[in-house]
Image: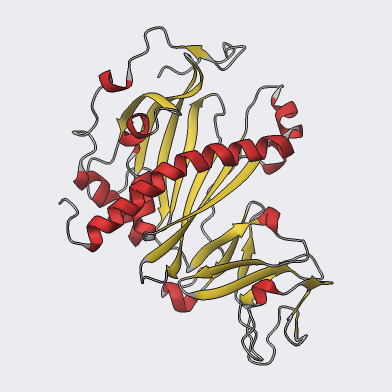
Amino acid sequence: MRPVPPGRRRRLPLSLRRDPVPWDRQRPTWRDAAPGVIAQALKRAQARPSGNWYVVGASSGLGGDRPVARTVAGREVVVWRGADGRAVGGPGVCPHLGAPLRDSPVRCGTLVCHWHGLVLDGVPYAGWAPYPVHDDGVLLWVRLDEVGGEAPLEAPVVPRRPERARALTAVYTGTGVCEPEDVVANRLDPWHGAWFHPYSFVDLTVVGSPEGSGRGDRDGEDAFTVDVSFKVAGRLVVPVRAVFTAPGPRTVVMRITEGEGEGSVVETHATPLGPDDAGRPRTAVTEAVTAASGRPGFAVVRRAAPLLRPLVRTAAARLWRDDLAYAERRWRLRATGRFPG
């Protein structure tokens, strides 16, 4: 993809595919998507520190009369806003008789157990002890040192994002029968995009990858650089260059570096939930989109955010319907010893 010179930005971000290639005539990518390259990038991602921080939900879900609740590696967790507006949280089990605090209301910054009225305000009480919580404005994080087992960090490794006041944000959450590594491996395989998601991506070329070098190549991270066009309608597309990196063991970030929406970020966070009734692992995928544009008309887009967020989440849900199937398939093959390589 050729960058647009300064001062020559297209009046519209759309391009018209002059000679569209049918899906089955596009260049195969299986030789480029070398299992060793993906496996080594995954291994290096898993070795990067997370500080024991896990994504539990969207910041926008915090502030009502119910807490944000999540199970992380079998531990019930609740998060709510205290009287001073800060996010607080801790175990989701009432210390009195074990009531599920996820079903308890928030009143004046306190969580009131709906079984017997025990009140928690985010400080240790009756054997209940809070967890460190971080609200980055888009996502909520909780630190679980006994789960992560790493040296703790004061705050999670949050990717650099466009200024939130000038961006459109949307958060999608889905759940799959797999482990976090299967989600991360999916995102570290950009070669599947135009083959597996032809309704969204066309003309995809991976122009840079770690090549199984044994080390990262972008500020200590692996980087997969992709030229791709987002489909709009018919032959209308939006061409961009995007870079995928894995700053932590459960996070992959896609950043648009050239083209429309330069600087926009899509984060994928994988949170282990614990086993289902059949003993299979479950993982929550939280995808946070922070979209920005230097075009004057983007101010209108931001004002229409309440209408656009459901559309963004619907598009993400369609992609993750397929990508979770990909991750679940990968886990099944690994669990039965049939995964290639």
Which quarter of the figure has residue 128? bottom right
Asked whether 108 or 317 is in front, the reply is 317
**Of all residues shown, which one is farthest toward the top?**
18
Q: Is residue 140 left or right of residue 67?
A: left
Q: Residue at x 51, y 64 (%)?
A: 54
x, y (%) of residue 148? Answer: 43, 72
Q: Is residue 62 left or right of residue 275?
A: right
Instruction: Name above or below for residue 105 compared with residue 201.
Output: below
State whether residue 114 appears in this view: yes
x, y (%) of residue 183? Answer: 38, 52
Q: Is residue 263 left or right of residue 195?
A: right
Q: Residue at x 60, y 76 (%)?
A: 131
Q: Residue at x 66, y 41 (%)?
A: 163
Instruction: Name above or below for residue 15 compared with residue 35.
Output: above
Quadrant where the image shows the N terminus: top left
What scheme was used to colour the molecule? secondary structure
x, y (%) of residue 223? Answer: 36, 41
Instruction: Name above or below for residue 272 compared with residue 215.
Output: below
Instruction: Name above or below for residue 309 compared with residue 126.
Output: above
**Of all residues shown, which one is farthest toward the right?**
108
Asked whether 125 or 114 is in front, the reply is 114
Asked whether 48 or 267 is in front, the reply is 267
Number of numbered tags placed on the structure image: 0
**Of all residues shown, which one is farthest toward the front?**
278
Q: Residue at x 37, y 51 (%)?
A: 184
x, y (%) of residue 278? Answer: 37, 70
State whether residue 5 appears in this view: no
